[in-house]
Structure formats: structure tokens, C-alpha cells
Image (cartoon, coloured by chain):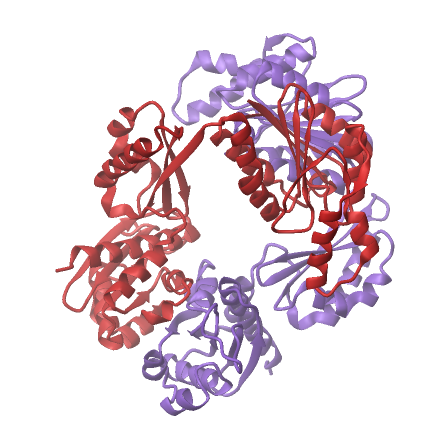
Chain colours: A purple, B red
Amino acid sequence: MKASILTIGDEILNGTTIDTNSAYIAKACIAKGISIEGTYSISDSFEGIYKGLTIASTGVQIVFITGGLGPTKDDITKQAMADYFEDEMIFNPDVFEKIEKYFEKRGKKQVELNRKLAMIPSKASLIDNERGTAMGMWFNTPSCQFISMPGVPHEMRHMLDMFVLPRLIEKHKLPKIIYKYLMTSGIGESSIYEKIEDLEANFPHDVHLAYLPNLGNVKLRLSTIVNDENETTAAKELENIREQINMRIAKHVFSYDPDETLGEVVGQILTDRNKTISTAESCTGGYISHLLTSVPGSSAYFEGAIVAYSYDFKENLLQVKHETLNTVGAVSEETVLEMLTGLLDRTGTDYGIAVSGIAGPGGGTPDKPVGTVWIAVGSKDKMTARCFQLTTQRDYNIKISAHIALNMLRNFILDNES
Amino acid sequence: MKASILTIGDEILNGTTIDTNSAYIAKACIAKGISIEGTYSISDSFEGIYKGLTIASTGVQIVFITGGLGPTKDDITKQAMADYFEDEMIFNPDVFEKIEKYFEKRGKKQVELNRKLAMIPSKASLIDNERGTAMGMWFNTPSCQFISMPGVPHEMRHMLDMFVLPRLIEKHKLPKIIYKYLMTSGIGESSIYEKIEDLEANFPHDVHLAYLPNLGNVKLRLSTIVNDENETTAAKELENIREQINMRIAKHVFSYDPDETLGEVVGQILTDRNKTISTAESCTGGYISHLLTSVPGSSAYFEGAIVAYSYDFKENLLQVKHETLNTVGAVSEETVLEMLTGLLDRTGTDYGIAVSGIAGPGGGTPDKPVGTVWIAVGSKDKMTARCFQLTTQRDYNIKISAHIALNMLRNFILDNES
């Protein structure tokens, strides 16, 4: 099945809005076996809409239309669609009632405007909008279906997922796709690929693996097409494959839930064990503390951080020895271990993280180039430290170090449970 | 002058890439008085390209084409364009030499491939690509000019700004636009509007003001169309208007440079005066420290931060009185002032920032609802504290508090200079 996407709206054409709707619709369609032949953006005018509908419907069975249904532009789009389909506008009492209720709730009484909003092309089958007032419209011609949705992304996405795709799946018996995820941290795409290359080569041909990298994390997404008969078996197969991948990179997999952050996972581990944490940060500059405190309720386990940028701070607040800083330097195993010891002594938290490195772009030496980062994690009784060689990009080094450190702590706690 | 934008590439149609090039081109065109009639994305195929060129060139004088010039897709796009313009491919020795040099530098010897890359439609006038190997191509027909650029955004943007737009401006005597900026912090769009509404009503009709909000900051952009004769006068007029706006919201304007961050401005103020800073953070959780340490070279003036999330931390590390916390609570003027005093006592930095608030979503009370934030800034000799009522969104509250705090410190230093 072939489709195209038509975006109506001047805000795309003057560059003030980047069109994210098309990519969302395209991804959802591909997942259901519908290919996108073209995407088109045209202006909010009779001429533009007429031209757009003509171009977009050539050679496809579905045209997804977004935008042009806002309150000020409402009349023209609906009227232009009515003209295109040689239709007329009629008053729809159900829509009127819905809109009246919507505005009454918000203390607005505007009968005339609401009557206007309730004028709909007679041939359109309506699509409910649970997130706003502009209804979707579905027109069928012998060769093509036209599906008109609002342009506001969260309204459009909800309408597409809840009403449009289910109706298309039902009508055309489209395939269904299921997904399983692995959220990884502290390992790059290519390293993951090397570790699971042989597994991937032997996947059943209908199982697909996507690598979705984000700063400091890589999301792995397994997918396969199913039908009503084989859905349970296929889901089990996917879970099996996920376990096989997990065995190869277990230290890096922090969740199977694609919406969970590493900060949340560490927070949950601490909450479950009724433990507390604090951080001692040099090059990460408070970013680990930020990741931990971005989680609602983190005050239950996070006590605080000491960001020790200067030697003074490291010595006075974290009891790092003057001699250590002067002999092996601030970016060293000795220093991060002393930072961690000093932190735990002072704060009394169960666990701690200490980081010291050269974020760049300046400050590197032949021995310790920009991107050298030492990280220590642990408790009073046991600590572990590691050195990483990252990039020359300051912002990237700060953020990836913070993720690596949180993942090291996660593994430390899980590995050292009695 | 009318134009359209044609994007060639399957990665747009399958939703893996969001098309940001079109918005960039559209904005640049609008600024030069070129209107965009439509944007079109089509697939990397002879049929797609032929159809796209036909649709996109209808009723316009310029078609901007992006994508389809990558090494693997190179042949088909160039060949399809040659077919469309009834042209033939010829070997271009200059391009060959350029490509040879490019790959030799990278240690690659690949004569055959390079010869292929150097085959170019004979009617195309070439556009230099200083950021990659795919040259741009410019075709003229009696009714329309077709400008083909690479799809990689940083290559396309550079080519458009450096070579394409100057050539269009020269050829069509397009108007030139000049800009002046005000970077503001700690004030919302609508508050700015209220303060300068009367000024804005009296702007000369050719002066336009855009409000460009970002998290915690609003960028104000003044623009006007000029020609060679009036450019100097118009620039002065724009600077005058900027000064008038600045007088109304001076406390919030931290820079006239659109690329400067608040962290950089504060860093420069401290560097100029040879002063140091530290922070004591509760609800911001290290985010102020992160903003300050994101600036390269910040170790020259930033000594460190104490993120005191727990009462223990506030008492032990910042010497906040037990009695204060138990009577007026952690989110109070008394507490932030004691946090600041304790911080400066301990660290000895010249300036300090202290923040305590309820970031949410939980933890609010009728007296102190979610979004209540106290901020203190100052030195040992003089301090000032203020209370802010923000939103119910945790992440927003953290980030906007951090920006407000940095802006308060900026004003404090500037106001208290002898």
C-alpha cells in the first residue's frame, strides 16, 4: 500500500516551524507496511490546497493531511476540501454540542463561532480529537482515501495512533509490529555491534534490530511483524533474542523499558535497598548531581554533591592530600579514590561517585590528553576506579562521563550484593 | 520572487531523518524577499526525481534541491538531472583533481571511483562545497533556475550562505536584511511585550521585532530591509531602537550577541574583575554549577559547588542553623541567606549564589506551593535575596531557577561596582 503526506500551513513554508509530523507519520506507516511515496507542504490557500491534494494523491491509495484546521484557518481548509470533493458544508449538531461543552468548561460562550466550527463537509466521515477542538476528516474516493488531521503534533499523534491507524489496520488487514527494547549506557554502537555480530547474522529473517543512539546511551530496538495467530510465539522469540543480546552486554543494559532514564534506574536501586548517595565531581561540574536530581522524589536517597573544581576545594572539602595533587595530579586514580573517601567520610552516605578529568578543549598534556577521565564508585568498605579516554568535545565529555559514572555505580551495587 | 524546495532522499520518506534543511532555506529566503510556494520530498529514484522536478518547478522561478548527492546515490541523481535537462554527463578535470586531493589527504587512492565522482552534467554550473566532496550544481532554464545542494545540513548551510544566496542577491538585486539582538533572561515573552508595547506600536513600518524564546531566555531580534544607500543610517536606527528597548528591561538584557550564553557573560564579568565564585544549590541540584562549568576555561573563576539536598548537608556543609530549618523551613529567605553565608565562609570565593525551592511535582504546601524558589546572591559584605513563584514542572523549574540566579548575580556585580 502506498501513501503520501500533505502538510498545509504557512508556518512550514516560512521556516518558523520544522515539520516533525511527517517523520512521525512515515515511521508509523512503515511499521505497518505502508510506504511513503512523497511528502508535500503547501500554503493555507484555496489554490495551494487544491494543488496539494492533486499532487499528493497521484499514484497512492492514502493521503495523510495535517494542519490547516486551526480556529483562524478552519473555514478555508474545510471549504477548500469540500470544493475539491465537489461537496457542500452542512451543520453537524454532534460536533456543535462537543465544541459548546469544550468552551463552556473554559467559561466561554460563543454561539456564532461554535456554529461556524460545526460546519463540516457532508461527505466527510469524522475522526474524534480527544486532545483539541478540530475534528479529523476522512474522505473516500474510488481510488484514494484522504485523512485530514490537525497540525498540532500532540493532537495529530494521538489521533493517528488511536483512531486512524486502527481503522486502516482493520480495513486493510495491515500487519502488526511488536517491539522489545534494551537500554544501554557507556558503550558505543560499533562496540555493541562487534559483540553481537554473530547473533545478529543468525536472527530469523523477520526480526529487525535498530540501534538508536542518544547522548551517553544507545537504545536497541528489536521488532518483528506478527498476526493474531503467531503474536504470542513471536513475542517469546523476541524476548529470547533480547536475553541472548543481554548476556553479551549485560553490564551496559540498565533497563528493558524504553522510557526509563539511568537516573531513574539508579534511584530505584537505592530506594529498594533503602540506601543513600552523594557525589564528588570535578570535570562533570555537577552534571551527575543534575541527572540524579532530575528524578522526582530523589531527595529520598540523594543527599548532595560536592563539586570540587579547584585544588582548594578538593583539599578542604574532600580531604584530598596536597601531596597527591602535587605528585600524581588531580586527574589520577589516587585523587579520585581520595575524593571518594573524603566524600563518604564527610557525608556519611552509603554510596558515592567521584570523577576527575580533563573535559577540554584546553588543559591536556602528552601524558593526560583532553578526554582523560578517572571515575571511582563505591562505599566506605569497597571502592573501584577506572580510567576512560573520551573525546576532545567538552560538552560531550561532561555528559558521557556522567552517564558512565552512574552506570558504574549501578553495576557496583548489583555486583556487591550479598 | 517565488521559489520551492525539493528534498531528495529515502531517509526523509521513511521517517528516520527529520527535514531541517527546508526550514533553514525557507528562513534565509524570506529574509531576502523570496517566498516559498511549496516544499516537496521524493524518493531517490529516476521516477521520483523526474516527478519532483516537474512539480517543484511549476509556477516558481527558483527550485532549491537538497540531498541525493551522497557517494552511493551520486550517480543516479546526477544522471536523473542530466536526463531531465536533456543533458549529457562529461568528465570534469577540476572536480577530479579536487576529489583526488581530498581522498589523498585521508590516505585513500581510488582512481576509478574518483573518475565517476567527477562525471558532471555538462550544462551544470558548479557550486563549490568547502565542507565535503559533493559539488553543488546550478541549472538555468528560460523560466526557472534549479540549485542542487548536498543534504548534509552543515554542508548545505555553508554552501547556501556562502555561494548560493550571494549569487542570487547579485543576480536579482535582492534586498538585504540587517539584524540587531537583545539576549534576555528571567523575563517571559508576555512581560517583555507589556513593557515595550508602546515602543513597538511606534516602530518605523519596516522594522520588525521577533520574540525567540528558549528555556530561561528570550532572544529579541530586530530586523529591517536595507539597500546600499541607506544601510548605515538604518543600522543606526536599529541600534537606537535597541537602546530604547534596553532601557525598559535593562536588568534582563545580558548580551547583544545572539551566540553568547548567560554562563559565558557571568564568566567574562568575573574574569575582567579577577573575581571567583561558588554556588550552594538545593532545588537546582547542581544545574547552576553545570551552566558555569560548560564554559571552557571556567576553572579560572569557578571554584566549586555544594549541592545540599538534605538537611544534614545544609547544616554540616553550609552551617545553616538547625533552628532555622525547623522554624521557617528550608525554602525561606533565612535559609538561603545562611546557605550563602556558610558557602562564602567555607570557600572564600568573592561571590556566591544560593538557591532553595520546591521543584515539584511533590512537596508543595498551601503556604509554599510547588514552584516556590528562594535565591540569594552576593558577597561577604552584601547579599540580596528574592522569592520567585514558578511553575509545576520540575525540569522547567530547575532550569529557569538556574538562569534567574545567574542573572541576579550578574546584576548584583554590575550594580555594586564602585
B73 to the left or right of B399: right
Nearest the viewer among A103 and B338 is B338
Q: What residue appears at the point 25 percent right and 29 percent down from the top-left corner?
A: B199
Which quadrant of the figure contains the C terminus of chain A?
bottom right
**Percent coordinates x, y for residue B81 in the rendering:** 76, 33
**Percent coordinates x, y for residue B304 in the rendering:** 34, 71
Instruction: Name above or below for residue B69 compared with residue A44.
Output: below
B299 to the left or right of B1: left
Nearest the viewer among A56 and B370 is A56
Nearest the viewer among A222 and A285 is A285
As drawn, which residue projects farthest toward the left?
A: B418
**Percent coordinates x, y for residue A180 in the rendering:** 72, 55
- Does the rendering let one see residue A7? no
Q: What residue appears at the point 25 percent right and 77 percent down from the top-left corner?
A: B346
Which quadrant of the figure contains the N terminus of chain A?
top right
**Percent coordinates x, y for residue B50 in the rendering:** 78, 29
Instruction: Name above or below for residue B294 compared with residue B404.
Output: below
